[in-house]
Image (cartoon, coloured by chain):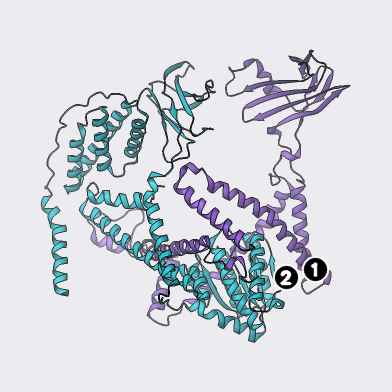
Amino acid sequence: MKRTVPLFITACVGFVLIIAYFVPAVGNVTDLALIHFDILAAIAFILGGGNLLRTHGEKIYKQQSGWGYSLIALGCFLLMLTVGLGKIGVSPAFNQGSWTGLMQNGESVSLVQLNKIAATYELSVTIRRAEANSKLDLSVAGTRRASIDIDEKGRAVFKADFDADEPQKNADNSWLAEVAHGAAVTVGSMSGQLAPFGRVTGEFNANGSWFWWLYEYGFQPLQQTTFAMLAFYVASAAFRAFRAKNTESILLLGTAFVILLGRTYAGTYLTQWAADPLVPPAPDDLWGRFLSFFYMPNLTEWIMNVFNKAGNRAIMIGIALGVASTSLKVLLGIDRSYLGSDKG
Amino acid sequence: MRQRLLGSTAALAFVLVCVPVAHAQPGGGGVRQPSAPPNSAARIEDPRDLEELRRLYLELEDGGRLSQTLRSVARFLERTKAGQPWWLETIQDRLELVAHTHIEAERSAYRKEVKELVNDVKKQLRLAFPPVAAVDIPNDDGSKLSVFWHAVPGAEKYKVRRRDVSKDKPWRDPVEVKGEKDSWDDDMLIRAGRRYQYSVHAVDADGNETLIGESAAVQAKGDLFHKRRWGLAGLVVLLSGTVILFIQLAKRGFDLKIRKIAGLEAVDEAVGRATEMGRPIMFIPGIQDMNDIQTIAGLTILGHVARTAAEHGAQIMVPTCRSLVMTAAQETVSASCLDVGRPDAYDEKKIYYTTDEQFGYVAAVTGAMVREKPAACFYMGAFYAESLILAETANVTGAIQIAGTAMPAQLPFFVAACDYTLIGEEFFAASAYLSGEPQQLGSLKGQDLGKIIALVLIFIGVLLTTLITVMEWQYSFAGDALDFIRNGILNTRG
């Protein structure tokens, strides 16, 4: 059972996704599967985060060798978690609208919300409890805007919308575009103020937030530094690997030399006698076309487009077949090693 | 025998080269005049004919398989009585002249004429549409419809409205299509099986609306099979079939010879080295998540390495970049230790999660390498720029390194820096190779047959492309055949 259920799920989901590629009527199952995977991965992060806390926490607690690094790692983890989850320093998303919260006066309860999506404004007044079969006046910023009929149950919903891109449609509601945050709203005897939805609507990594600042000025420079060190690693690997020991290695060394030189200005400078990059040789200038072959950028491009591309494509064909075969074995349950032991 | 073969090949080559050259007319045959002027087109009303018309129109816009598309258009117009294909013979003549004329200026003139004539054909097809026509887009799940209308001179934009006829709903708010457009693809909340109707208004600069027309109701249909992908489906069935065939043959005792893969033969050596030196083994399963097949392949190899390490009593460390990979790796290593009767060899703390960030992970792993000084490092999975940093750092610590990845861009780095590298499909073959199970080895043989099929397709494609390039046969059978391989079988157009 422990292995049968996962195998069954793997086979079902896998074959459904393959079939969905050829059977459009099934719909966009691939995107749905990816969304489900993202949800699972997000939940699984709790395991990863817990493991991180435990590993480093234990090291700090037992003061094992290198516990200082663990303290920094854990401190940074908790700091980013706190500023991200807490949305510290995040501005409210003013462009999304505002509301009054619940307005009450005695037994009457109502709520006013102003939504803004692109250039469209939508005012929604919900009266949850009021005197049945009556009328209540709606005023915004001191101006009476509408009269709302309350039904026999003491409830009502009033909506007004306005599209700034089509001002001629619903022109009577054009005042919606001028309602400012903090505007006073009254519905009958209930009153309130339109306030933004709050920090909840802002993005945790919006520009200016603490999370953004720590990521841009703390983490990114470190990341780019590590990436920049690659140049030195390439040099040391090349120095070790490219040795003229036999014919193949001499060919490899020669090609690497041409490509490395061709990708720098030095290659262009040293071979500028061979061709003028601004004036290509005429089609009938055979000698000029022959010489231009030795212009380093041209030679580099030729090696990359002919030899390298051919080899790359051959590897990719092999990879594609390998992926297809491995996937088939996993789907058919022939290869089960990723699930763990066969025994027990 | 060999001489006879060479002779036949030479004769065939002579025929292939000389026959078309002999037919080439020096200086071209002169520009011929069209045989008849165009007729006005009858309007198409039948929904299936409209779908066919849309398909032909888009194929002409695409430009591929021109000869075949034009013949299809001619047959369609004749069948539906929507027009006389007076242009067919003319365009075919021009295409022949393009193929056989060697003077560049004349060839360009013929190509230009072909392009103009094809534009006339497209205009004729456009006229065959009703003033407003709605067509179901094929090869979808029934959530898209296409609307065509006759463009009105002076219109700045068009307002397209839709109505659900099945539910007898009113007209929805219009969608504006700005510019000189005459079609629009609607994918807004369309339900398969329902019938929809469209109306289109032209709007001029002053905002005045003029009704162009209303379409007939069209049903949004989901297709049971994607007609453009049948070639690819056939190829998938063929390749899968070969793999399954050899798996079945292997189960029945068919003898399979697999060549030695140096990187996999060295796994035992690397683990043994680590045991002797008393230093740990570090296994890195790549930086992608469990939804990547390379990660699964890497974890399969981890199972084998962990088994060997448990047998020898060596310690294994697995820093992971993803939480799901960490849990899968823990399960794999614990199962491997259990398999060899060494459950005490499993240390959960050695398989840990670091971070999802690429270079943060690299920094953590290289730090661990420098501190722990592993004797053997395995890099099995998907890697990006961090591959060389990992390999070089481990090299500095003196570890034996075995890498395997299916990322072509990282292979050169691993080849340069590591002792052994599993290149592409060797990496995927590792699971079968290490397990030694006949049915897994059978799948490798199936892959080889797949490679032969790929070789045959490559050979045919290269031959056709060479003929087309050298002999200018793009508008002949060779062009159609190449287009069929590209788009019909390999589905490069999607």
Residues tagged 2 and 1 counted as in contact (Cβ below 8 A) = yes
Q: Which chain is cyan?
A: B
Kind of element beneath mark 1: helix
Q: Position of residue A217 (x, y in %)?
A: 69, 54
Q: Position of residue B255 (x, y in %)?
A: 40, 77
Using residue B493 as the reference point, say whether residue B462 is left or right of it. left
B356 to B348, vertically: above or below: above
Report how far apart the C-alphas of labels 2 and 1 lie in the structure. Answer: 10 Å
Q: Position of residue A153 (x, y in %)?
A: 78, 19
Q: Residue furthest right?
A: A106
The residue carrying pointer 2 sits among few (fewer than 14), some (14 to 19) or many (20 or more) residues within 10 Å by Cα, namely some
Q: Place residue B109 in its image quadrant.
A: top left
**Residue B349: which disc?**
2
Amino acid type at image mark 1:
Glu
Quadrant location, the N terminus of chain B: bottom left
The residue carrying pointer 1 sits among few (fewer than 14), some (14 to 19) or many (20 or more) residues within 10 Å by Cα, namely some
Amino acid type at image mark 2:
Lys
- The total of numbered circles placed on residues is 2
Residue A310 visible in the picture: yes
Q: Which chain is purple?
A: A
Judging by the rendered image, the residue that carries numbered circle 1 is A58
Foreground: disc 2 or disc 1: 2
